[in-house]
Amino acid sequence: MKCWALFVAVLLVVGYFTGVLTPFLDKVWAMVNTDSALTTPAPLWQQRLGGTPRSATIAGGAVIIEQRTLVESRGLGSGAQLWEHKADWAAVAGEGNSAVVVTGKLLVKGYEVVDPMSGLVRRRDTEARAVWTYRNGMLDVRCHGAEDCTLSAWDPQGSSPRWSVEIPGIGFVLFADNPDILGTKPMTTRRIDDNAGGPDLMPPMVGLPIDNRVYVVDTAEGKVVREIEPDRDERVVVVGGRVLRIKAVSADGTCYFSVVASDAATGGEVWRNAGINLRTAKDGGCAQRDDPAGGRNVVVGVAADARELVIDAYDGRILFTGAPGEHLLGVDDRYAVARTADAAAIRSAELGGRGHWQRPVTSAGKVALTAPAVVVVDEKPDKIIALNPGTGAELVNVRSDADVLAVGPAGLIIVSGRDLAYLPFQGSGGVPNPPAGGGNTGGGTPGPGADCGGPKQEVCKAG
């Protein structure tokens, strides 16, 4: 047998180099190297990348893919590569025609603002230490000394800052793209990327943690409006334009929680609630190390009877109360998505409204709420499903064991290993239409009637 194996090997090598077997071997190699479709039915397109993607974001007509040491852009309509840059991190700011890609290198100051379609550098910065990206703008911070820094706001495609404000030194906790600030943390799950929905709107107020204090910055006016030193039993977060001071006091063998919300600019109390647990403390102790779960200007809490709540951080209203045994899976300013007590279905409810729907899902199914869709990665059988958050209508329903990397206004980006594919929503045509009027240029605060940050639209300016 060994002799026959050696003879066949020699025959194949000689045949290949003499050209006799080259066509046959090329066909065999092509068969081995051909990837099967990630979904049934097949996706609009599927491409194999040079490395495993860490994240992806849909930016207008392109999908921006972040890998370990490079960033690449591919056309949303075909998956063809548009450009590739060496970079350690990337984030998308803006939306539609106004979208840009911000790239940089770890432990190196500065960043580049890149056009997502052409790859041309629109703006280059050499001093910023951290940058935050949003659908309607960007923030960056640069330091001139240990206790002398400047926070600036930019339009995504802008060439000069909207405003700049001086802040104390930021230490080493704020670096690279989108470092944590004091707000809500999104509700996440396995097999759906934590940032699948892309950038959110810039909040009206941000809380920066600096030297054990919280500096509250008004992002519309560009000024520090408050400086807060939390008490030992407090956690301070900034949500929906309010400063939430969350207390957890140990007594009688348990933790007693209370929340006081104040106006970020004046410090005046707006609302308070005692007995609501915002899950900022873990493991039975009262030390608060986590931000509350939530999205935009709502936070998730637990009532005394163990039912989960969605609370409007702006005025303290209870916008959603779960049934006994229900478990919240995702929230934003419009909807709450929960798994039913028997784990056999999910339901979506409009916050402060009457719209709702329910759909069967296996107990192992993973669910996430994004602005364009409720995404379900189900198992046994393996499926990827996207649903309209308001109506529950199916946007995508395919058989697949891939993971979801990004959700855009017109479809999903999924991944398995190095294979990337695009699933357009039903009736979308695959590529999102540009915004009316040529696209949002990302300038200023939304006007009345726009999506201004919550059921009360409290971020909108009057007039």
Image (tube, grey):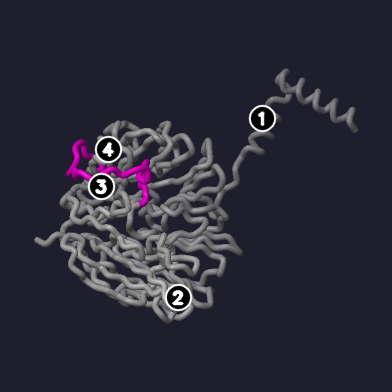
- Quadrant placement of the N terminus: top right
Name above or below for residue 174 compared with residue 297. Answer: above
Mark nearer the N terminus (3 vs 2): 3
Q: Residues within 10 Å of mark 4 (few under 14, many from 20)?
A: some
Q: Is residue 411 visible?
A: no
Q: Read off the magenta span.
A: 153-180
**SS of the residue under disc 1:** helix
Tell me the residue that label 2 is attached to.
254
The three-letter amino acid code for the residue at tag 4 is Cys
Prevailing secondary structure of the magenta residues: loop
Who is closer to the viewer here, 80 or 241?
241
Query: Residue 26 has which mark?
Result: 1
Marks 1 & 3, CB-CB < 8 Å contact: no
Marks 4 & 1, CB-CB < 8 Å contact: no
Between the residue at mark 4 and the residue at mark 2, the CA separation in whole angstroms equals 43 Å
The three-letter amino acid code for the residue at tag 2 is Thr
Name above or below for residue 126 compared with residue 432. Answer: above
Name above or below for residue 430 compared with residue 458. Answer: above
Between the residue at mark 1 and the residue at mark 2, the CA separation in whole angstroms equals 70 Å
**SS of the residue under disc 3:** strand
Who is closer to the viewer here, 59 or 255?
255
Q: Residue at x 20, y 70 (%)?
A: 269
Tell me the residue that label 3 is attached to.
137
Tell me the residue that label 4 is attached to.
143
**SS of the residue under disc 2:** strand
**Residue 2 falls left or right of residue 369:** right
